[in-house]
Image (spheres, rainbow, N blue to C red):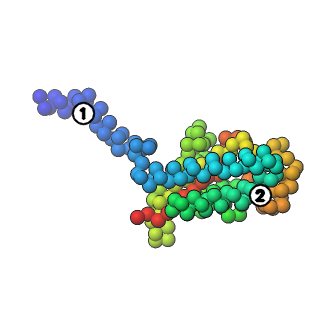
Amino acid sequence: MASRTLLNPRRWLLPALALGLAGCASGPSQDTAWQAEARQVAASVPPRLLTVLQAEIARGGPAGAVEVCRDKAPAMARAASEQSGWAIRRVSLRNRNPKAVPDAWERAALEDFDRRAAAGEPPAQLERVEVVNDGGRRLQRYMRALPTQDLCVQCHGTPDRISPAVAAKLTQIYPQDRAVGYRVGQIRGAITLYRPAP
């Protein structure tokens, strides 16, 4: 009887596959506490910035929002960093702010996001989570793609979407600006977080 059970693949193959796949599964149920925390922190900052920008655009138009974004986005990231204990910033392969240049890990993640988006994955769901060694210290790192919203193309879009007033303001504030030419839905950059691993 035992030999018949071993020879019958239906008796052992499906349970073995299920166990093997369970070990490879990923998603919210497999997250560690720090990964879930990083995801929550990263998701909290962009909506607040969009709310501030919408209010500024309603008050003074998109040209005024350029300076607000320059000043408020880093301030919001600093406040979220102080509150959460994570170092938080925004980065892009085509940065506007010179401080938004990605490091090697962030660059690799952004390039991976672009490949995955080109293969059909929804940009709003793209993230990277990893514990890395950085100069002898272990860091917990998290990154989430930031897709271009309709609001964003007024300052980051193609030339036909950017007004002359916005173009002039961008040239004045960011003479080396590379963050234009985006369409709605394209990955404009990412929010990136890190902190020392315990």
Q: Looking at the picture, how far across and down is residue 99, in whole percent?
A: 67, 64
Whole-Å distance between the Cαs marked 2 and 1? 64 Å
Image mark for residue 72: none
Choose between 159 and 16: the one closer to the eye. 159
Q: Looking at the picture, how far across and down is residue 147, in whole percent?
A: 64, 45
| Residue visible at 74% across and 47% down in the picture | 55
Q: Quadrant of the N terminus?
A: top left
Can you identify the residue that label 2 sits on? 67
State if disc 1 and disc 2 touch (CB < 8 Å). no
Choose between 93 and 72: the one closer to the eye. 72
Q: Secondary structure at mark 1?
A: helix
Q: Amino acid at mark 1?
A: Trp
How many labels, in total? 2
Choose between 54 and 132: the one closer to the eye. 54
Can you identify the residue that label 1 sits on? 12
* 142 horizontally vs 101: left or right: left
- Say whether residue 110 is visible: no
* 80 horizontally vs 7: left or right: right
